[in-house]
């Protein structure tokens, strides 16, 4: 069974492993202890919101959102900073489930925009994000999902 829910400190051990794999995918050195510390700080301080995707009871993916604000729009926005699904679980709908949950979080919190940025070389992401309603700003590969 596939599901998505918000993660908390009880999920820290298994999230840390997946987060470390995500960092390695982005060509960073493996640092499981640093990953655990970083996530623990984010969750404890409520600096971010992290949703996890599950296949039965196995955590197979996550997305991490950070709050932002627009002075011009006088409103809240969210940054979808991290999205990752373990290799064996890709192309099974988990990324779309996580994005859908992130969008719902934006609606639930009265945000106007969900922003994200990805590398131009991220072929999977650059196909996924427009397919899920994000709009491309061509100069930088910044995307946004407009509520209306």
Image (cartoon, rainbow, N blue to C red):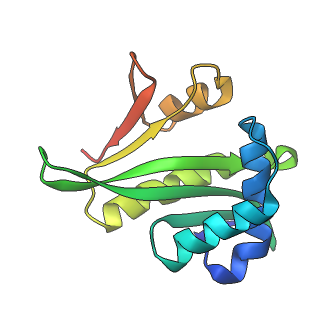
Q: Position of residue 13 (x, y in %)?
A: 78, 74
Q: Which of 45/80 is in front?
A: 45
Q: Position of residue 126 (x, y in %)?
A: 57, 26
Q: Which of 123/93 is in front?
A: 123
Q: Is residue 93 visible?
A: no
Q: Does 114 sit left or right of 20 as displayed?
A: left
Name the residue rendered at 52%, 34% in the picture: 129
Q: Residue furthest bottom?
A: 10
Q: Which of 117/133 is in front?
A: 117
Q: Position of residue 6 (x, y in %)?
A: 57, 72
Name the residue rendered at 64%, 81% in the picture: 9
Q: Position of residue 62 (x, y in %)?
A: 65, 58
Up the image or down, 58 lies above or below 99; here it is below
Q: Does 121 sit left or right of 113 as displayed?
A: right
Name the residue rendered at 77%, 57% in the picture: 18
Up the image or down, 8 lies above or below 143; here it is below
């Amino acid at each position: 069974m596939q599901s998505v829910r918000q993660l908390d400190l009880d999920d820290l051990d298994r999230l840390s492993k997946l987060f470390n794999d995500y960092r390695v995918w982005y060509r960073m050195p493996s640092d499981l202890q640093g990953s655990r510390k970083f996530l623990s700080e984010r969750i404890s301080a409520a600096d971010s919101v992290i949703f996890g995707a599950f296949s039965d009871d196995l955590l197979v993916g996550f997305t991490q959102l950070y709050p932002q604000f627009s002075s011009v729009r006088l409103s809240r926005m969210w940054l979808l900073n991290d999205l990752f699904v373990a290799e064996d679980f890709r192309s099974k709908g988990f990324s779309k489930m996580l994005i859908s949950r992130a969008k719902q979080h934006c609606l639930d919190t009265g945000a106007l925009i969900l922003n994200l940025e990805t590398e131009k070389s991220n072929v999977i992401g650059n196909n996924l994000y427009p397919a899920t309603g994000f709009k491309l700003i061509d100069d930088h590969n910044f995307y946004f999902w407009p509520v209306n």
